[in-house]
Image (spheres, rainbow, N blue to C red):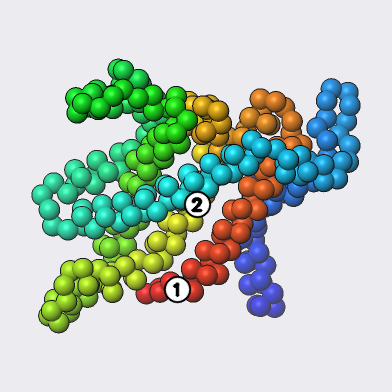
Amino acid sequence: MTRTREWIYAWLLIAPAMILLVLFTHYPAVANLWHSFLSTPKGSRPAVWVGADNYVQLVEDPIFWQALQNNLWYALGTIPVSIAIALLMAVWVHGKIAGRGLLRLAYFTPTMLPMIAVANIWMFFYTPEYGLLEQVTKGLGFASHNWLGSKSPALASLMVVTVWKEAGFFMIFYLAALQSMSPSLAEAAAIEGASRWYFFRRITFPLLMPVTLFVLVNAVINAFRLVDHIVVMTRGGPDNATALLLYYIYEIGFRFWDSAYAAALTMVLLAILGLTALFQFFVLERRTHYQ
């Protein structure tokens, strides 16, 4: 009887979380999969079963492949840089330096700003002829450049904005992990004559791997869910150079009102994130040391 009562208490405790998880995560995913095999309802015409037609259209869609390629380059350009800068900032402000409280605040400030506000700030930086970046480059003798209006630097310009905003957020997790480490580790390494680089490479960084894995999961998710900056800064242009996958789904679903095709695109995005999560937890997790 006691065992049964414990099971009842346990299920009652996790029931609210399970209900919310099913309603707002699992059910929408299953419903989206179902809708991806239907046509888009138009007026009085209901949705009908079309099988894999939406996925065939997806394979033949050049803009989808362009958005997917842009997203992969965007992820490769922002995730490693953001994590590396966050780690460097955390190590720096963890040390005994003057004004480290102000430095921590300065590094974390971009994270607290709304994404729309961040996009508008950087729009001012990138404005041709009059923007802050243009004034600096002119002062150094470089020619004027349309950073967001030219196809080649537009995506890289978005990457800079993302790194600027996310590095401070990731820094907080690394800083908390550094502060939780026992100072006796550094003292023992100093007694043994280990250099600071050797101590960081062989002791500090391996102990930070759980945090790195957590940060990596968040960075991957953020890299595939960017919409706000694109809507404000480029709207996917020029010539789809900055169209990322989620923004393309947003356009298909809410601008062209093709919900069935948007559902098929969403399933591709979910598959990419799912495979990435499986790799992170079943491959990287095995190389992670937990204290």
The quarter of the displayed image where residue 282 is located: bottom right
Q: Residues within 10 Å of mark 2 (few under 14, many from 20)?
A: some
Relative to residue 178, is residue 81 drawn left or right? right
Q: Residue at x 21, y 68 (%)?
A: 197
Query: Which amino acid type is shown beneath numbered disc 1?
Result: Arg
Q: Residues within 10 Å of mark 1 (few under 14, many from 20)?
A: few
Q: Name the foreground residue: 133 vs 151.
A: 151
* Tag 1 and tag 2, C-beta contact below 8 Å: no
Extreme bottom residue here?
Answer: 192
Q: Residue at x 88, y 23 (%)?
A: 44
Figure check: 179 above or below 44: below
Query: Which amino acid type is shown beneath numbered disc 2?
Result: Val
* Position of the C terminus by quadrant: bottom left
The answer to whether residue 290 of the structure is visible from this angle is yes
Q: Name the foreground residue: 290 vs 162.
A: 162
Where does label 1 land, which residue? 287
Relative to residue 136, is residue 193 drawn left or right? left
Residue 220 circle label: 2
Residue 138 screen position, x and y as percent: 23, 23
Q: Earlier in the sequence, mark 1 or mark 2?
A: 2
Residue 116 screen position, x and y as percent: 44, 29
Residue 253 screen position, x and y as percent: 68, 31
Q: Residue at x 66, y 37 (%)?
A: 62
Figure check: 277 above or below 202: above
Count of number-bearing discs:
2
